[in-house]
Amino acid sequence: MGLLYRVTSPPGRTVAGSWRGARRAEPAMAPRANGRGAVMGHSALATVGAASIQRLVDSITDLALIQLDRNAVVRGWHAAAEALTGYPASEAVGEPITLLYTDNDVAARRANADQRAATETGRHEFRGWLVRKDGARFWASVTFSPLRDDAGNPEGYLSVIRDLTDDRAGELALLSIEQMVDAITDYEVIRLDPDGVVRSWSEGARRLKGYSEEEIVGRSASLFYTEQDSRAGVLSREMETAARAGRVEAEGWRVRKDGSQFWCNMIMSPIRDAAGELLGYVRVGRDLTDQKEQTRLLQRQREEILELSTPVIQVWDNVLVLPVIGTLDSARAARLTESLLDRIAQIQAEVVILDISGVPAIDTDVAQHMLRTVEAARLMGTTSILSGVRPETAQSIVHLGIDLGTLRSRNSLKDALQLALGLVGAASSDRVSFDA
Amino acid sequence: MRDQVPILRMGNDLLITLQGDLDDATVEHIEQVVTREVARASAAGALIDISGLAVVDSFVARVLARLVAMVRLLGAEATIVGIQPAVAITLVELGVPMGHVRTALNAEQGMAQLRGVRDESTSR
């Protein structure tokens, strides 16, 4: 009897059944039991309930079921197949399935390959373009399952066609995002799950860290951290901050697969679903080792220059001279204050001479810096004397309305030194008036 | 720090050493002890050494200014000694008004300064 077939379903499970038995299998498998195809098979359905199964099959509209014989010639044509392809059963039955294939696929003998694969594996699916009667192409999933008669002899194939044009658009969008991410080779763009386990990897990440996708996906991102950072829980802190603040940016030494380290700038943001549930994190990282080195070098050079540009000279037992040369910016001024005060503490200087004859112009900022330095020195118990004020400097100080307070000033370094020695050598009664 | 405000008498002057952390209770205690001692000894001057303070912030700065004012009200001169470079910078950055507080590098110079002030005021 032609109603029973043995069909091997995808995982290799053997299902034997009639129309009724077919209910246990997925709906797409249903019409395989009909020896002559769904549309023309009414007369062959002798079992009870066959008519209702037929109605069920006919009501499937988003899957097209096609029965093929061993030579892949159409023997059964489902109503949905007509709707999908534009061929009525009368035109399709008796034609090879390649009727729906693109010229390229026909040339590549795709149908033969598909049948062979279906026979060997029990189920074969391909995704590709099919052609409608009007010549329009649509993206489809086509599955082939071999049909066997009671004796187990191959009798043909059941082919299920699904229109995936809409899915295809989504698939393409997804693909292009993946491609986009992979095209970013200077940055790593990876996804972590909420526990910090790597879930997606990119070409840029591979270049940066040396792990291939197979090696790293499924492992914890704490691998990228130095042992110390890993123990300190830097990753979980970063994830926590990202989840709370919506973003975290961090820089630090990270570890490559080969154990070498690089200075990494990383931005991490949480990924949430529509309900706000945390799905994971997206991490964008970048190798900034070169920039880091450069910054460090610059910083060191800058410090050296600052060091050179703010010399503090001891000219007498308790007298210091600070010749200020060039323009004072805030970094230099801070450095100047610092080195002066340290020196004061070191030699317990009683008088400091600030010589500004080498300063091209005094503006409010520079004056403020100087005054703050003088005040800090005073708090330590040291008297300051200004020297080297040029005529134009004197004018601009007064015009700017800068109040030098009780700061004493002398025209030349020589005069300032004289005053300083007088203060140091003289009775301490001379040294009390600076807060008056 | 309670009951541990070392106060040394040096001639007519007192050397008061502040140490550790200052909190409200400690400050109150210090103020009591210092005013009591200055009054009891009829001190002419008080040197306050703050080199041993762990933190000097605007609170401590206000405390110091207050202490100086109290000493002055008791008829003595006050000088703060031992301000470290970092402390000096902090106080200036904070903009704490310390203009009326006399300072000196160390106890020795502070002492000389106090004597100088006295000589000046007696000679006037």
Image (spheres, coloured by chain):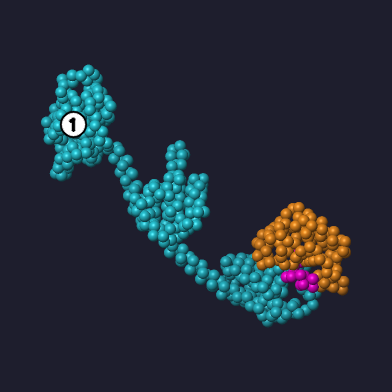
Q: Which chain is cyan?
A: A
Specify the amino acid type for callout 1.
Leu
Rendered position, A386 above or below A257: below
Q: Which residues are magenta?
A: B101-112
Residue A131 in sight here: no
Decide: few, some or many residues near mark 1? Use Cα within 10 Å; few <14, some 14-19, many ≥20.
many
Task: Please tell me in which quadrant of the rendered image residue B96 appears.
Answer: bottom right
Q: Position of residue B97 (x, y in %)?
A: 72, 61
Residue at 50 percent across and 57 percent down: it is A228
Name the quadrant of the N terminus of chain A: top left
- The picture quadrant where one finds residue A67 is top left
Q: Residue at x 18, y 33 (%)?
A: A157
Residue A361 on image: x %, y %: 59, 72
Q: Secondary structure at mark 1?
A: strand
**Chain bearing mark 1:** A
A297 vs A395, left or right, is left
- Hue of chain B? orange
Q: Nearer the viewer, residue A53 or A360?
A: A53
The residue wearing badge 1 is A147
Q: In the visual, does A351 lie left or right of A105? A: right
| Residue at (22, 20) in percent of width and height | A50
Q: Position of residue A405 (x, y in %)?
A: 71, 68
Q: As displayed, is residue A27 above or below residue A233?
A: above
